[in-house]
């Protein structure tokens, strides 16, 4: 996935971004400015423990099992939105 995430293109994508942002905020406790371009590690300071919690929360919320190759594609919040869109087959 590219680190250049386009603007949110529709309401479904905006809703998905809001839901993923809520998961991030629940894990990191303190809310930071989170945008689709936010880097999970550099900007949001997700270490390996936070990343495990994040993946588990996504798997529970969206009812899927994240594969290692899917995890490797995730750099930004926008990458997460795109992955969930693909999994849920949202155009």
Image (cartoon, rainbow, N blue to C red):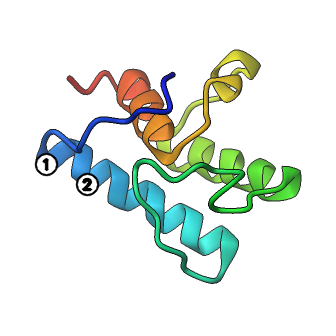
For the point 66% across and 80% down, which residue is it?
Answer: 29
Q: Nearer the viewer, residue 45 or 86?
A: 45
Which numbered disc covers residue 22?
Answer: none
Q: Eyeballing the image, is 20 above or below 63?
A: below
**Disc 1, SS:** helix
Residues tagged 1 and 2 counted as in contact (Cβ below 8 A): yes
Is 35 left or right of 44, judged from the image as shown? left
Give me the residue at 54% from left, 63% from top: 23
- Whole-percent x, y for residue 88 in the image: 36, 28
Residue drawn at x 58%, y 47% is 58
The residue that mark 1 highlights is 11
**Residue sitting nearer the eye, 61 or 48:** 48
Kindly identify the residue that appears in the image at 63 percent across and 22 percent down. Answer: 70
Q: Is residue 42 above or below residue 4?
A: below
Foreground residue among 28 and 1: 1
Is 15 on the left-hand or right-hand side of 41?
Answer: left
Q: Could you say where residue 51 lies in the image, as x and y percent from the top left?
A: 75, 50
Q: Secondary structure at mark 2?
A: helix
Q: For residue 81, what is the image quadrant?
A: top left
Horizontally, residue 49 falls left or right of residue 56, namely: right
Q: How many marks?
A: 2
* Residue 76 spot, x, y in % from top left: 54, 42
Q: CA distance from mark 1 to mark 2?
A: 6 Å
The quadrant of the image that shows the C terminus is: top left
39 shown above or below 85: below
**Which residue position holds label 2?**
15
- Most extreme residue toward the left is 10
């Amino acid at each position: 996935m590219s680190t250049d995430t386009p603007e949110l293109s529709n309401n479904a994508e905006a809703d998905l971004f809001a839901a993923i942002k809520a998961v991030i905020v629940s894990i990191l406790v303190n809310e930071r400015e989170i945008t689709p371009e936010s880097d999970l590690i550099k900007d949001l300071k997700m270490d390996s423990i936070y990343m495990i919690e994040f993946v588990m929360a996504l798997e529970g919320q969206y009812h899927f099992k994240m594969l290692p190759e899917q995890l490797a594609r995730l750099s930004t919040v926008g990458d997460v939105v795109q992955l969930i869109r693909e999994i849920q087959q949202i155009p």
